[in-house]
Image (spheres, grey):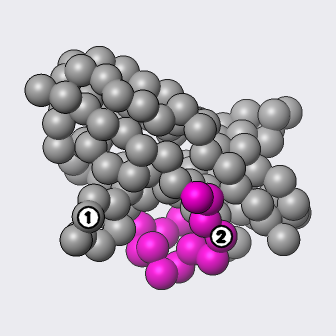
Amino acid sequence: QVRLVESGGGLVQAGGSLRLSCAVSGGPLSNLVMGWFRQTPGKEREFVSAITWGISSPTIYADSVKDRFTISRDNVKNSVYLQMNSLKPEDTAVYYCAARHDRVSRRSDDYGYWGQGTQVTVSS
């Protein structure tokens, strides 16, 4: 059973940076796809970025975060990261780490494993 634990959220001013971490346990990890999603009250969960665990590690991003956010993984630490730069107030949300087997996907319904979420608040 895959278990995900996020950390790194907090309060930051617009233009600032935060790095979210997602510790991954259980397995196997080799065919996992890791995703980051975010959600604000009253809205559906929104795709942010995803990366595969394999050697090729293709990454995909939502247009709203492209060129500002970077997803990465550390195979030794079994962790996935989301580096968020040039943060905007509209990035304020609860950020969730998610995992699935098989191919990358932007659909939250495709992910079967979820962390508890970490709050990111960007002040103007």
Instruction: Look at the image and say whether residue 82 sits in the magenta stretch.
Output: no
Q: Which residues are drawn in magenta?
A: 104-116
Query: Which mark is nearer the camera, 2 or 1?
Result: 1
Query: In which quadrant of the rendered image does the C terminus lie?
Result: top left
**Is residue 87 something that shows in the picture?**
yes
Q: Are marks 2 and 1 in contact (CB under 8 Å)?
A: no
Q: Which mark is residue 113?
A: 2
Query: In which quadrant of the rendered image does the N terminus lie?
Result: bottom right
Label 1: few (<14), some (14–19) or many (≥20) C-alpha neighbours in 10 Å: few
- Residue 62 on image: x %, y %: 30, 53
- Element at label 1: loop
- Residue 34 on image: x %, y %: 61, 56
Q: Indicate the quadrant where residue 97 lies.
A: bottom right
The residue positioned farthest toward the bottom in the image shown? 109
Closer to the N terminus: mark 2 or mark 1? 1
Position of 110 relative to 78 (above/below)? below
* 5 lies left or right of 46: right
Q: Nearer the viewer, residue 80 or 18?
A: 18
* 87 lies left or right of 74: left
Q: Nearer the viewer, residue 14 or 51?
A: 14
- Residue 10 on image: x %, y %: 42, 31
Residue depicted at x 61% and y 65%: 114
The residue under label 1 is which amino acid type? Pro
Residue depicted at x 17% and y 43%: 90
Q: Which mark is residue 41?
A: 1
